[in-house]
Image (tube, helix red, strand yellow):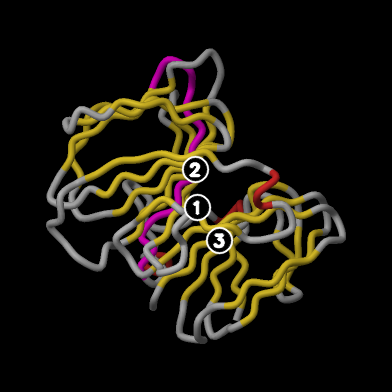
Amino acid sequence: MIERRPLASLGHARRGWLDVKHHFSFASYQDRARMGWGALRAWNDETIAPGSGFPPLLHRDVEIITCVRKGALTHEDDLGNRGRTSAGEVQVMSAGSGVTHAEFNLEGGPAHVFQIWIDPDRRGAPPSWGRKSFTQEACKGRFIALASGIDGDEDALPIRSDARVLAVALKAGEAATYRFADGARRGYLVAAKGRLQVNGVEIGLGDGAAIHDETDVCLMALDDAEVLLADTHA
């Protein structure tokens, strides 16, 4: 089953420096019908104004995957990590037993990011942070794993969950198929660019698609399209 979640139906908050759309209940946006999806707990579509960002916050036992779509974010934490993650790069923070971190847009223009939260399979592990660049060429016409806790995804950033976050870029008219390990898996897909069909269901720019009871998911690009997909246990 493919459940389209139109962009206009998402939670929306604006703080002046932050414009964010919530695919799931988060912060001030609460919807009992959207309390997560399998191990996926949050998917926030954020635009962060230049010279602003998130002050230091403490997190525990969550895998936070940040995919930078435009601009850059600078990360700092109390483990001593500091790094700039720019468009086309991904960072993962495994909060584990606890880490205090801040994220700032120190650039001259807005930053656009997807921030994805996934529940870990084990709690209380030492916290960690890392980032990696993924070229546009790598995901042309095929899915690549950006962050994963699944065996065989050695090129992805590691997370502590039986889950993965993938990307694919398709030219208009191109297709790609993703196969879940079994029909009990949960998938959540977001169209980061363009329009496409997902098993025949049209998904527009910024829309989400909640996927369950499917083994094969066929994507057909109606425009040049870029897609992110989370695959988690139920």
Q: Indicate the quadrant where residue 203 lies.
A: bottom right
Under mark 2, the amino acid is Cys
- The image's mark for residue 146 is 1
Query: What residue did someone put label 2 on?
Result: 67
Examine the rendered structure and indicate whether residue 144 appears above or below residue 152: above
Under mark 1, the amino acid is Leu
Q: Secondary structure at mark 2?
A: strand
Q: Is residue 37 magenta?
A: no
Q: Are marks 3 and 1 in contact (CB under 8 Å)?
A: no
Q: Tell me what residue is drawn at x 60 percent, y 77 percent.
A: 179
**What crowding class fits label 1: few (fewer than 14 Cα within 10 Å), some (14-19), or many (20 or more)?**
many
- The image's mark for residue 45 is none
Q: Tell me what residue is drawn at x 52 percent, y 58 percent.
A: 145
Q: Are marks 3 and 2 in contact (CB under 8 Å)?
A: no
Q: Are marks 1 and 2 in contact (CB under 8 Å)?
A: yes
Q: Secondary structure at mark 1?
A: strand
Dominant SS of magenta comes to: strand
What range of the chain is rendered magenta? 39-52
Q: CA distance from mark 3 to mark 1?
A: 10 Å
- Quadrant, the N terminus: bottom right
Q: Position of residue 6 (x, y in %)?
A: 62, 58
Query: What residue did someone put label 3 on?
Result: 229
Q: Tell me what residue is drawn at x 33 percent, y 47 percent.
A: 28
